[in-house]
Image: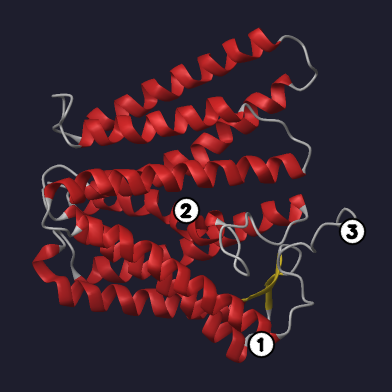
Amino acid sequence: MPPQGQPPPTGSTSASPGQRARTFLRRLASSILLWTAVLLALFSDHPAVATWVFLGIMVVLAAAGLMEFYGLAAQRGLPAFRICGLLGGTLLMVGTFLHCTGRLGIHGSPARVNDFETSFLILFVLGLAVRLLVSGPTGQGLPAMAVSLLGLLYVPWLLNFIQKIHFFPGIEGLGRYYVLYFLVVTKLSDTGAYIVGSLCGRHKMAPRISPGKTWEGFAGALLFSTGASLALAALLGSHLPGMRTDHALILGLILGAGAVVGDLIESLWKREAAVKDSGRWFPGIGGLLDLLDSLLFNAPLMYLYLRHVLTRP
């Protein structure tokens, strides 16, 4: 049972089909507006907008999403060094941006940025240890360090892969098309899961985590994501370096499945925290994590496929 005074866990079956449809449509509209703003910045002809506005949006999303994550942990009574996490997440996003755009003079291969992120995470863990030492024995030091680090990894670090796709070396100016591709395929996976699941969903996929998810909806997610992937590969053509029909098919399946898993992971955390939404940024819809969950899971998958398959010599 959820704690007294809190909303029922996510996935509660108390919502009517009409309510679920309205919530889905609001969430879809919010996602479209949010990522349209990102894409407008990416494809702007003005260099300052295409770089600094894009960075600003990424930093805001990372910071807001991270605070929501720490809020979910607090609902479970788990502490976190919020200020350290927020500062670390911001520095990670900005540092990756500076490396990717060559503003530190060491741009040239994906390994450069990955080395920076590894070094940053090492320093972040050491910084958390010093922060714990300063606070002294509280009986909550281990969970505070664990939650702070997990929050940084789950939100800013995973979101950072969007930057690394956008500025991927060797395909200068075309990474933004892969960001467009990745966003559309992932969000159409969410749409397909809802539409097919609502129309003919019968077999529960993970009833203890999200009772509304069905295997039919999962099939719909794969169908929509694969169709979108094949269509974009044909429409964008040479703007997606290395993309062939077989890669479009494989990526469509990977991103479709990844979107469902990412949504389930956040549903699990919300259920454990006994909350319906991750935040209250969007009344009737939820928080930023409710809009980012599938993208956070898929961003590194898209980056790894881009680096090790699509752009392999």
Q: Is residue 215 above or below residue 99?
A: below
Residue 109 in percent (x, y) is at: 17, 34
**Mark with earlier residue (1, 2):** 1
Q: Which mark is residue 18?
A: 1
The image shows a total of numbered marks equal to: 3
Which residue is rendered at x = 63% and y = 40% of the image?
A: 70
**Mark with earlier residue (3, 2):** 3
Number of the front mark, 1 or 2: 1
**Mark with earlier residue (1, 3):** 3
Which residue is rendered at x = 38% and y = 31% of the image?
A: 92
Q: How is the image coloured?
A: secondary structure
Decide which of 175, 243 is in the foreground and name it.
Answer: 175
Q: Which residue is mark 3?
A: 1
Kind of element beneath mark 2: helix
Q: Is residue 191 above or below residue 40?
A: below
Q: Which three-letter amino acid code belongs to the residue tagged 2?
A: Phe
Q: Which three-letter amino acid code belongs to the residue tagged 1?
A: Gly
Q: Which residue is mark 2?
A: 297
Q: Is the N terminus in the top left, top right, bottom left or bottom right quadrant?
A: bottom right
Q: Is residue 286 above or below residue 145?
A: below
Answer with left or right where residue 76 lies relative to residue 264.
right
